[in-house]
Amino acid sequence: MKVKRFVAANMQLALRKVSQELGADAVIMSSKKVDDGFEVVAALDYQTGESTENPEVERQLELQRELEAAKASRQQGSQEREQRLDYARQSDVSSSAGLKDVLQGLKDKRYSDDRAPQAGLESGDDAVDQAGREAHYNNVIHAMSGELRELKNWMVSHQGSAWDTSRPLTWQQSQLWQRCQDVGLEPAWADRIASQISDEQSVEQAWQQALKLIARDLPVAAPELFERGGRYALVGPTGAGKTTTIGKLAAQFVIHHGADSVALITLDNYRVAAHDQIGTFSRLLGVELHKVGNEKDLKAALLKTQNKKLVLIDSAGLASQDPHFQTQLSMLKRTGAGLKKLLVLPLTSQGRCLQENYEHFKAAGLVGCVFTKLDECFSLGPAMSVAALTKLPVTLVTDGPHIPDDVHYPDAAKLVQLAEQMARMARTRWQAADAMHLATQSRFQQGA
């Protein structure tokens, strides 16, 4: 005979359980109301006249009750573990203070639970026992701290870094990585910065260290570079600000060294009225201007201006698909080591565009870059990423149309600070826009 106990919220559900598990041949031996609803005891292969007080029946029922109690205990333990995990997630585990609160709460609970039965003991040996318990609990809390830290790191970044999935970032490193993304840094650079910082400090302290690492990684040319003179060709896309930058540099040099110390050369013979702007600079400043169309003319112009202290070459902003693009690039590359090529990067362009500009012009033999249109941009991170990842020193930064004032020598720390300020302002603007949208939506719903 097989005997089983069923408990359900009502008698109908209990009988349905009996039918589903024991089948239509089951015999109801007893039924009664209990705390959880209704209890039904049913049997299979029950013989008529057989006593319901059979010891075997009682034994099977007792075993079943024990199994149900054990199962309930396991479920309760699982629920408590889930609650602890939920508490760790929902509480401010994102900060070290939050984690300490969780650990201290667990420690206080364990300590008070263990200490309660000992409340009636006197001092003496009990003090020794208490010290032993304190040491034991400290060890337990230390172990739990490590386990919770690992759990926290796994929950936040168990998939690893976006660029190095073989090495997961810790929770704090993932926070720094995200802040680098907000500044506009390329993921590869952000990963390199975040991975160098340990978790033995607060997030804000770690972020300040990260900003210093970013500034250290950003290459900048020696200050007052152009005051020494030299021969420089500016290359870059159309509208990047090459000609205007040349006008600013020439004007500053003329102010300090005189018009006879400067010469201008233009390679732009592909656009209508291409010489008008640089021709205007030449007339206003009183400096020489040479217009060249091929490699032979360029070498001749450089020979004629060899006595000039500063020679600036303006190139045409051609698309990489233009048939003249490679011709101009080859001309600049073969001119010689004395001519330094600088890539002009407009800060208003997207990061991918800046990367493509570098790829297109690097064959010319670049030695540095120029950041233009700082006054019009909203994120410095993309251009900084190009300079840092390609090891291309930033030589100049321009921030307006005024000649000769709006051109400056770069300072890595100031550029990084400005990049962070731009990121904070952008985040504030988005938060304000989101709040305004929610307020407008709420008014619309109330009006409806």
Image (cartoon, rainbow, N blue to C red):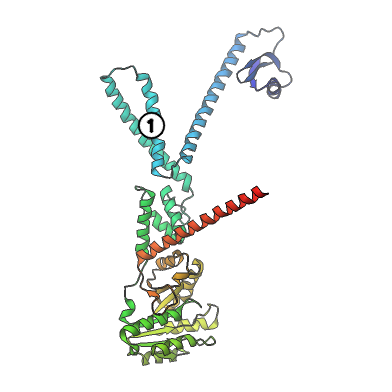
Residue 89 locus on image (x, y percent): 48, 40
| 75 in relation to 305, above or below | above
Pick the residue in front: 303 or 202: 202
Q: Residue at x 48, y 40 (%)?
A: 90
The image position of residue 327, as x and y in percent, is 49, 84
Q: Residue at x 47, y 37 (%)?
A: 87
Circle 1 sits on which residue?
Answer: 107
**Which quarter of the rendering shows the N terminus?**
top right
For image coordinates 36% across by 90% down, the residue present is 305
Q: Is residue 270 left or right of residue 367?
A: right
Near mark 1 (Cα within 10 A), the count class, few <14, some 14-19 or many ≥20, is: some
Quadrant of residue 28 in the image? top right
Q: Is residue 337 visible?
A: no
Circle 1 SS class: helix
Q: Along the horizontal axis of the image, is 202 left or right of 30?
A: left
Residue type at tag 1: Lys
Q: How many marks?
A: 1
Viewer-nearest residue: 428 or 170: 428
With respect to residue 366, does 175 lie above or below?
above
Q: Residue furthest front?
A: 447
Locate residue 86, reporting x and y percent: 49, 37
Residue occupying image coordinates x 55% and y 54%: 434
Q: Nearer the viewer, residue 369 or 263?
A: 263
Residue 118: x percent and y percent? 35, 19
Q: Where 71 sits versus 190, above or below?
A: above
Res 313 visible: yes
Extreme-right residue of the structure: 24
On the rendered structure, is 176 left or right of 136?
right
